[in-house]
Amino acid sequence: TVQSFCGARLRFWHSPMLHTARKNSSGGIHIDRDEFKQAFTLFDSARKGYITLQDLRSTLSVFDDQLGVSDYKFLMNNKKSLTEDELYKMLCDNQCSLDPVNEAFKYFAMDGKKSVMDIEKLRGVLTKLGIDGITDEDMKIIQDIAGTNNDDEITLAHFKHMLRVDPSVAGAAESFI
């Protein structure tokens, strides 16, 4: 249900892991093997043990429908399929220094206006991810957590605030669920 999804997300957003990303030996973002396994299942929804370009396209198009075939081939390292181990080995020694919170915000930001996210666009993305039945009340809770001042727009500062949910707010929201 939407409420249990929101509760799980609140616990995730409150996690200090988001705010203090560990670094790997190359100075990039550390990729935890167990968390990677969970993420891999988003792409390997049929549980085949590998992903294809089509699997990647099906999942990523929810976030960005402007990626072309060459982008997907690049992400697949020009291979027809990648196992979980192959993909992990490709990614674990990354040298990325991007801020994952800023990058996540960019995915949700309004077209042509990378400084503001529309609350209805967020609802659309959640629906595309398979979270059905999102009510206006659910969206109001998200707005309240983000601190949007009821203007239906979430700035990067609001988004970061939403990820740093006060423990009392997270506890209250979890008790609602």
Image (spheres, helix red, strand yellow):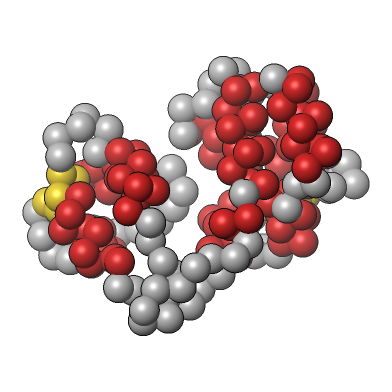
Residue furthest to the left in view is 80
Left/right of residue 173 with respect to residue 15 in the rendered view: right
Regarding residue 61, the answer to whether it shows in the image is: no
Regarding residue 127, the answer to whether it shows in the image is: yes
Residue furthest to the right in view is 149
- Where 150 sits versus 175, above or below? below
Q: Residue at x 49, y 68 (%)?
A: 22
Quarter of image, res 90: bottom left
Left/right of residue 10 with respect to residue 73 in the rendered view: right
Q: Residue at x 58, y 32 (%)?
A: 8
Query: Which of the two residues, 36 or 44, is positioned nearer the viewer here?
Result: 36
The tally of labels here is: 0
Query: Which of the two residues, 153 or 39, is positioned nearer the viewer here?
Result: 39
Query: Which of the two residues, 108 or 102, is positioned nearer the viewer here?
Result: 102
- Where 167 sits versus 1, above or below? below
Left/right of residue 11 with respect to residue 90 in the rendered view: right
Left/right of residue 28 with respect to residue 48 in the rendered view: right
Q: Residue at x 41, y 66 (%)?
A: 30
Query: Which of the two residues, 171 or 82, is positioned nearer the viewer here?
Result: 171
Quarter of image, res 160: bottom right
What percent of the width, then of the height, locates residue 78? 13, 65
What percent of the width, then of the height, locates residue 20? 59, 65
- Quadrant into which the N terminus falls: top right
- Quadrant into which the C terminus falls: top right
What percent of the width, then of the height, locates residue 24? 39, 73
Q: Residue at x 63, y 62 (%)?
A: 19
What percent of the width, then of the height, locates residue 147? 84, 47
Quarter of image, res 47: top left
